[in-house]
Each structure stands twice: as C-alpha cells, then as structure tokens.
Image: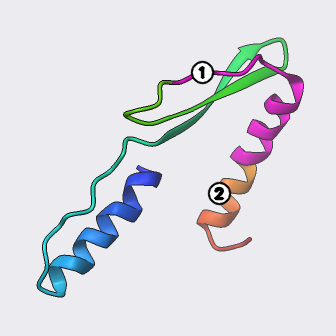
C-alpha cells in the first residue's frame, strides 16, 4: 500500500485537474523476512523484477526491529 499511495495521489490530482488517471503502479514491494536465530533478510521487487533475497544477517534483523519501532513514531508524527 505504501508504494501504491503515491500513484493513487497522482491519479486523483490528475482527475481533479480535468485529466485522466494515467499513472500506473509498477507492483513495487519491500518486505523484511525473519529467518530465525536473530537473522533476517529482505525482498524488494516489482512486476518486472522478481525477488532475489540476499543471505540472512544479524544486521538486517536489527534493521527490521528498528524499522518496526521507528515506523509508528513517524506515523504518529513524533519523529
């Protein structure tokens, strides 16, 4: 939903201005994947580029944990 929101906004603005909704969502996705033993990896892909996850690491695990905490701070406007 995060990546498609920009496309939706562009299409809404275009329609309000009398144009057409011509912007297309490319299927972009980013997702952390916990793999166990305090390790994680991620995938990033779209409709034309298939997912190729890198090997799991402890660093990505901690990045995921940090992201989970920081997300709600930004969503609430605190950060």
Element assignment for label 2: helix
Residue 64 location (% of width, % of height): 74, 37
Q: Is residue 16 left or right of residue 30?
A: left
Residue position marked by numbered label 1 in the rendering: 52
Above-or-below relation of 63 to 4: above
Left or right: residue 60 compared with residue 19: right
Mark 2, Cα crowd under 10 Å, few <14 / some 14-19 / many 20+, is few
Residue 39: image location, x then y, percent: 81, 19
Residue 21, how many percent across, how many down?
17, 67
**Quadrant location, the C terminus:** bottom right
Q: Is residue 54 positioned above or below 48 on the image?
A: above
Find disc 2 in the rendering and name its residue: 72
Indicate the quadrant where residue 71 lies. Answer: bottom right
What is the magenta segment's predominant secondary structure?
helix
Q: Position of residue 54 (x, y in %)?
A: 72, 21
**Residue found 75% across the figure and 23% down from its top:** 40
Q: Secondary structure at mark 1?
A: loop
- Which tag, 1 or 2, sits closer to the chain's start? 1
Which one is closest to the eye, mark 1 or mark 2?
Answer: 1
Residue 59 is a magenta residue: yes
Magenta residues (range): 51-68
Looking at the image, which is closer to me, 49 or 13? 49
Residue placed at 26% from the left, 79% from the top?
13
Q: What's the distance in space between the residues labelled 1 and 2, CA to CA?
A: 28 Å
Tell which residue pokes out farthest to the bottom in this image. 17
């Amino acid at each position: 939903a995060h990546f498609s929101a920009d496309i939706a906004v562009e299409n809404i603005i275009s329609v309000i201005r009398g144009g057409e909704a011509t912007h297309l969502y490319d299927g972009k996705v980013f997702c952390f994947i916990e793999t166990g033993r305090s390790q994680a990896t991620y995938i990033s892909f779209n409709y034309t580029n298939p997912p190729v996850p890198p090997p799991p690491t402890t660093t990505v695990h901690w990045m995921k944990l940090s992201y989970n905490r920081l997300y709600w701070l930004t969503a609430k406007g605190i950060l």
